[in-house]
Image: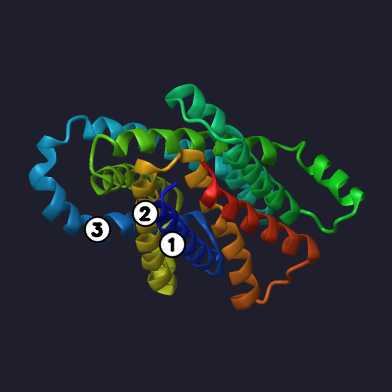
Amino acid sequence: MTLTAALLVILSATTHAYWNFLLKRSGGTQLFVGLSKVGEVVMFAPFFLALVAPKIGRFDGLFMLAAVGAVFVLVNYVCLAWAYRHGDLSFVYPLARGSILLFLPLLAFVTVGERVSGMGACALALIVCGIVALQLPSLEWRALSSLGQRLRTPATTFALLAAFAAACYTLWDKHAVQRVPAFAYIYLYTAITAIAYGAFIWRRYPRTEVAAQWRVHRWPILQVGFLNITSYLLVLVALRTGTSSYVIGLRQLSIAFGVLLGWWLLREQVSVPKRVGVALIVVGCLVVGVAR
C-alpha cells in the first residue's frame, strides 16, 4: 500500500468512527440511518449535477456498476438488520466488520488474483484477534468459551452474511473505480440505496415520527450523511492502488477509534480485554502499513 493510500484510509477510519459515534449517541435507529441516506443524496446533488451529469455519457457502464454495488450494499444492510434483531450492537457491529477479513483475502485471490504476503496475513490475523478480544468480559479461558457459545446464534449467522456481502461489494467497488470516477460511482449507488431506504421509511414510519426525528436530530443526521459518503470516497480512492485486503484491514482502525471515542465522550468503561483488543488492532494496522 502506498503512503498516500494509507493516509487516506486512516483519515477514512477517523471519520467513520466519528459518524458511528454520532449514530450511537442519537439512538442508532433505522429511521435515523434512512434519513441520513436521503440527506447524503440531497447534500451532494449539486456536485453531481455540476461535475458528473454533463459528462455522464462518457462513463460507459456507470449505471450498471452502481446498480450492482447498491445491491451488495442493500444485502449488507438487510443482513445487519436481521443480525441486530437477534444480537446487541456491541456484539454484531465488530463481528460484521472484522469478519470481512475472513472472506476478503480468499475472494480477492480467486476473483482478481490479489495475494497477501505472510506479513500481511499475520497483520490481518492480529486485527481479527483484536476484534475478538473486544468481545471478551475477561481474559480467562471461561470467557473465551462463553464467546464460543455466543457465536452459535442467528446473530452470528446474519453478521457473517453481512460481512460476506461487504467483502463482495469491496471487490466490486475496486473493479468499478478502475472504470469510472469514484464520486460518480458512489453517488449513484448511494442514490439507489437512498431510494430503497426512502421507500422503507415511507411504509414503516408515521409522518409525525419522521418529522420528530428530523426536528430533534437534524444536525447529527446531516453530519452522518456527509461523513458517510466522504469517508468511503476516501476508501474508493485508496482501493485504486492498494491491495483490497490491506485497505479494509487498515480501515479497522475505526473500531479502535470508536472505543476511544466511547471512553472519552460517552464515558464508557474500557476493560482490560478492550485495551488488549485495541492494542492488537493498532499493531495489526501498523504491520499492514508496511506489508507487501
Q: Which residue is mark 2?
A: 234
Give the answer, above or below, for where 259 lies relative to 204. below
Q: Are marks 3 and 2 in contact (CB under 8 Å)?
A: no
Identify which residue, 199 or 55, lies in the foreground. Answer: 55
Amino acid carrying label 1: it is Leu
Q: Where residue 129 is drawn, which disc sits there?
A: none
Q: Is residue 270 visible?
A: yes
State which tag comes first along the sequence, 1 or 2: 1
Q: Which residue is mark 1?
A: 11
Q: What's the residue at 55%, 33% (across, down)?
A: 105
Mark 3 and mark 2: Cα distance apart in space:
15 Å
Can you say whether 162 is above or below 15 in the image?
above
Left or right for 96, reference 276: left
- Labelled pair 1, 2 in contact (Cβ < 8 Å): yes
* Protein image colouring: rainbow
User: Marks 3 and 1, Cα distance to the nearest angstrom?
Assistant: 20 Å
Mark 3 or mark 1, whichever is nearer to me? 1
**Callout 1 secondary element:** helix
Q: Few, some or many C-alpha atoms within 10 Å of disc 2 (few <14, some 14-19, many ≥20)? A: many
Q: Residue at x 43, y 40 (%)?
A: 73
Pointer 3: what residue? 44
Q: Position of residue 115 (x, y in %)?
A: 51, 30
The answer to which of 271 and 111 lies nearer the viewer is 111
Instruction: Give the residue type at disc 3.
Output: Phe
Amino acid found under the numbered disc labelled 2: Leu
Task: Please tell me how crowded label 3 is: few (under 14), some (14-19), or many (20+) other residues with Cα within 10 Å.
Answer: some
Mark 3 residue element: helix
Q: Residue furthest top?
A: 110
Crowd rating for badge 1 (residues with CA inside 10 Å; few <14, some 14–19, many 20+): some
